Amino acid sequence: MPTSPKTFGQAKGLRPVRSLSKQERGYGGEWERISRLKRQRHPVCEDCQDRPSTAVHHITPFHGIDDPRRTDITNLIALCGDCHKARH
């Protein structure tokens, strides 16, 4: 008689890994203030120049919350949702 299929990725006795919060990923209050400022300065998408900017993207990725590129406004570009998705 066949047995039930194995379930992969769920080792017995292990709890699921917790996702990091936005603060832990570097997108807390300071980031929200800088993101809002960038979108106020560039209300239209800097890529397509056709839609309102709704997201802010790091041109050069940052590594960790202590990386100065995380909050460097010259390393940011204001984008619409579609252009932001295209960059990811």
Image (spheres, rainbow, N blue to C red):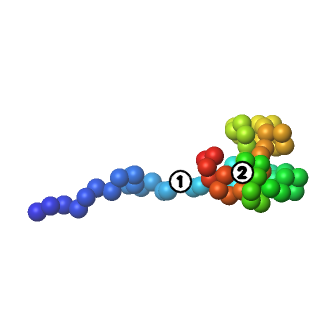
**Residue 48 marker:** 2
Q: At x 69% / y 38%, what residue is drawn?
A: 61
- Residue type marked 1: Val
In 3D space, how far apart are the residues under numbered discs 2 and 1 (Cα atoms)?
38 Å
Disc 2 crowd, CA 10 A, few/some/many (<14, 14-19, 20+): few
Query: As rendered, which of 10 and 39 lies closer to the eye?
Result: 39
Query: As rendered, which of 37 and 65 lies closer to the eye?
Result: 37
Q: In the rendered view, does 86 fall on the left or right side of 44?
A: left
**CB atoms of marks 2 and 1 within 8 Å:** no
Across and down, in percent, residue 10 comes to 40, 54
Q: At x 59% / y 55%, what residue is drawn?
A: 19
- Residue type marked 2: Cys
The residue pinned by badge 1 equals 17
Q: At x 67% / y 52%, what residue is drawn?
A: 83
Disc 1 crowd, CA 10 A, few/some/many (<14, 14-19, 20+): few
Whether residue 17 can be seen here = yes
Q: At x 73% / y 43%, what residue is drawn?
A: 58
Whether residue 30 can be seen here = no
Q: Mark 1: which secondary structure? A: loop
